[in-house]
Image (cartoon, grey):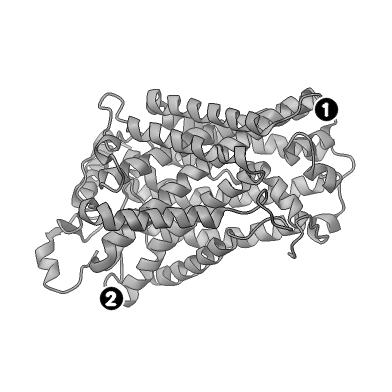
């Protein structure tokens, strides 16, 4: 691609930001491959599955994990396609809350956008804290395997999670120019690690489980019956490339996750021993059961640790950009400080530091409850899902009220748009409810799922702050200034809001 074409595309993307009332402050350094690598490092499904395998092993065993994965991926793709279409039209770091502000009826746009922003930031930062937990578990699990006399304590896990967050913070502040290169290398390392791990465990394990165990026999130990939108302002030609990165990363994650689950399920030993392993990581126990080698197990586990560290860096970057964008719209306390961009490195340093501190605070939940890890996972997922559901909801409302039948952008779902949004919305609402259920029975103060309380507090804070300060100070995208009528793929037609207002509706 010629330098002139790249420059022209960047100018077009900057014009989109200006149409929403923003100035380009972050450096555009990501290409398509780099953004796919960045996004995939966040949704590296097979690695994440390995980190939370204990939940699936205890809650139904391999059949539940595999069949649930297939269904979840199909529904997740509808959400990805819906998000990609909206992102193509409005490639801003605010992501979900910015889209709600643009698509919702003007009378409720700012309020809905504000609440969405709070849930979005909570989900992203909690996901980073979850990833830090997973990395700490993999490292400490190897220590326990290598030195059986060593006992893993909860405070060990929390402190190591702190260390991962601090390392990611340093990289985010002092190495932002390396993000695209790191992301390109990450996708290669990710795929290479996936192939090596699957090949090794399948080749070395000489006592595999029968197909009935993997696809039929349910296990129950619970007591119950059974990434790129926020980085668009740092991406070249974001309107075209960001949607591709969103969808492709989900496809790659779905396929690798499916293959990983089946392969690992065949190699699980005694399911009780796997679930109760002293390493704290069922995946490490499966590696050891397959290779019968401490060195081999640690080698495979170390490959995962590298992936988790890359993901930690990416999640902190995504979280800090979301904080920066929300502060830029004056949606947070101390917004002026959090919205500052360090001119030399072109990164929001204070937003990075705040993201790190909140991640560490969420990791600290594990000090007080045995199910702290599960609770943070649920907070992350529910925060994400609620923030995803809002733009899909207002997209459907805008369609049926003729407020916005179509949205601009080079990536479009055409006549299928409203149906894809509807399916994705129903999926998100259903999962948002189920993530509040306890994971163990009987329920007590030690194993209680506190997700509903945490999400309720966040919702309450967002509503209270909206009525006390938010409705006066929160701006959101300045869609009243001018409306984007045609996407950056073609000619850019910007017309004044006064002309649009006379039609009693806005065409986006």
Q: Residue 253: image x %, image y %?
A: 58, 48
Crowd class of label 2 (few under 14; some 14 to 19; many from 20; radius 10 Å): few
The residue shown at (24%, 36%) is: 4
420 vs 124: above or below: below
- Position of residue 312 relative to residue 230, above or below, is above
What residue sits 50% from the left and 52% below the top? 454
The quadrant where residue 341 appears: top left
Q: Is residue 225 above or below residue 347?
A: below
SS at circle 1 = loop
Quadrant of the drawing holding the C terminus: bottom left
Quadrant of the rendered image containing residue 208: top right
**Which residue is at a point 81% across and 61% down the rendered structure image?**
216
Which residue bears the numbered disc 1? 293
Q: CA distance from mark 1 to mark 2?
A: 64 Å
Query: Relative to 187, is 232 on the left or the right?
Result: left
Front residue of 178 and 435: 435
Q: Are marks 1 and 2 in contact (CB under 8 Å)?
A: no
- Secondary structure at badge 2 equals loop
Q: Residue 242 at what x, y percent from top left?
A: 39, 48
Is residue 115 shown above or below 318? below
Image mark count: 2
Question: Mark number for residue 233?
Answer: none
Other-residue count near label 1 (Cα within 10 Å), few / some / many at <14 / 14–19 / ≥20? few
Mark 1 or mark 2, earlier in chain: 1
Residue 410 visible from this viewpoint: no
Q: Quadrant of the N terminus?
A: top left
Spot occupied by residue 339 in the image (x, y as percentages of width and height): 27, 38
Identify the residue position indicated by label 2 in the image: 402
Q: Which residue is found at the position 87% from the left and 53% from the top?
A: 210
Residue lying at the far right of the rendered structure: 207
Is residue 352 rendered to the left or right of residue 136?
left
**Residue 323 visible in this rendered orientation of the protein:** yes
């Amino acid at each position: 691609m010629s330098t002139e074409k790249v420059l022209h595309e960047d100018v077009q993307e900057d014009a989109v930001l200006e149409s929403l009332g923003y100035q380009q402050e972050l450096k555009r350094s990501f290409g398509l491959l780099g953004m796919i690598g960045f996004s995939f490092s966040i949704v590296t499904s097979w690695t994440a599955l390995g980190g939370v395998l204990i939940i699936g092993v205890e809650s139904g065993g391999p059949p539940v994990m595999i069949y649930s994965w297939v269904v979840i991926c199909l529904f997740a793709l509808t959400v990805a396609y819906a998000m990609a279409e909206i992102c193509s039209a409005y490639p801003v770091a605010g992501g979900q809350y910015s889209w709600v502000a643009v698509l919702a009826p003007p009378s409720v746009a700012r309020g809905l956008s504000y609440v969405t922003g709070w849930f979005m930031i909570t989900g992203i930062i909690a996901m980073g804290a979850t990833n830090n937990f997973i990395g700490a578990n993999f490292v400490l699990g190897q220590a326990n395997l290598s030195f059986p006399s060593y006992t893993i304590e909860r405070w060990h896990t929390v402190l190591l999670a702190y260390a991962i967050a601090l390392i990611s913070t340093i990289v985010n502040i002092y190495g932002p120019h390396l993000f695209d290169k790191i992301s390109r290398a990450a996708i290669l390392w990710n795929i290479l690690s996936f192939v090596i791990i699957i090949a090794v465990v399948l080749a070395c394990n000489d006592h595999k489980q029968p197909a009935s165990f993997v696809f039929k026999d349910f296990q129950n130990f619970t007591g119950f019956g059974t990434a790129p939108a926020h980085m668009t302002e740092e991406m070249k030609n974001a309107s075209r490339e960001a949607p591709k990165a969103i969808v492709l990363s989900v496809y790659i994650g779905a396929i690798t996750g499916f293959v990983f689950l089946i392969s690992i399920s065949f190699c699980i030993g005694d399911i009780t021993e796997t679930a109760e392993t002293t390493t704290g990581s069922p995946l490490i126990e499966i590696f050891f059961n397959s290779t019968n080698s401490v060195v081999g197990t640690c080698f495979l586990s170390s490959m995962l640790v590298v992936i988790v560290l890359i993901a930690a860096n990416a999640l902190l970057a995504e979280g800090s950009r979301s904080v920066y964008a929300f502060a830029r719209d004056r949606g947070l306390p101390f917004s002026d400080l959090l919205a500052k961009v360090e001119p030399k490195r072109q990164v929001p340093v204070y937003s990075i530091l705040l993201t790190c501190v909140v991640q560490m605070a969420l990791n600290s939940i594990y000090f007080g409850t045995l199910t702290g890890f599960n609770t943070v996972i649920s907070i992350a997922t529910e925060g994400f899902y609620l923030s995803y559901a809002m733009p899909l909801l207002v997209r459907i409302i805008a369609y049926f009220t003729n407020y916005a039948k179509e949205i601009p952008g080079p990536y479009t779902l055409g006549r299928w748009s409203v149906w894809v949004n509807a399916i994705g919305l129903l999926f998100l609402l259903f999962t948002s409810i189920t993530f509040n259920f306890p994971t163990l029975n009987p329920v007590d103060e030690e194993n209680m799922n506190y997700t509903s309380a945490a999400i309720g507090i966040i919702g309450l804070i967002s509503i209270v702050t909206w009525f006390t300060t938010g409705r006066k100070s929160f701006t959101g995208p300045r869609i009243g200034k001018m409306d984007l009528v045609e996407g950056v793929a073609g000619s850019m037609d910007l017309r004044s809001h006064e002309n649009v207002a006379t039609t009693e509706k806005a065409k986006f």
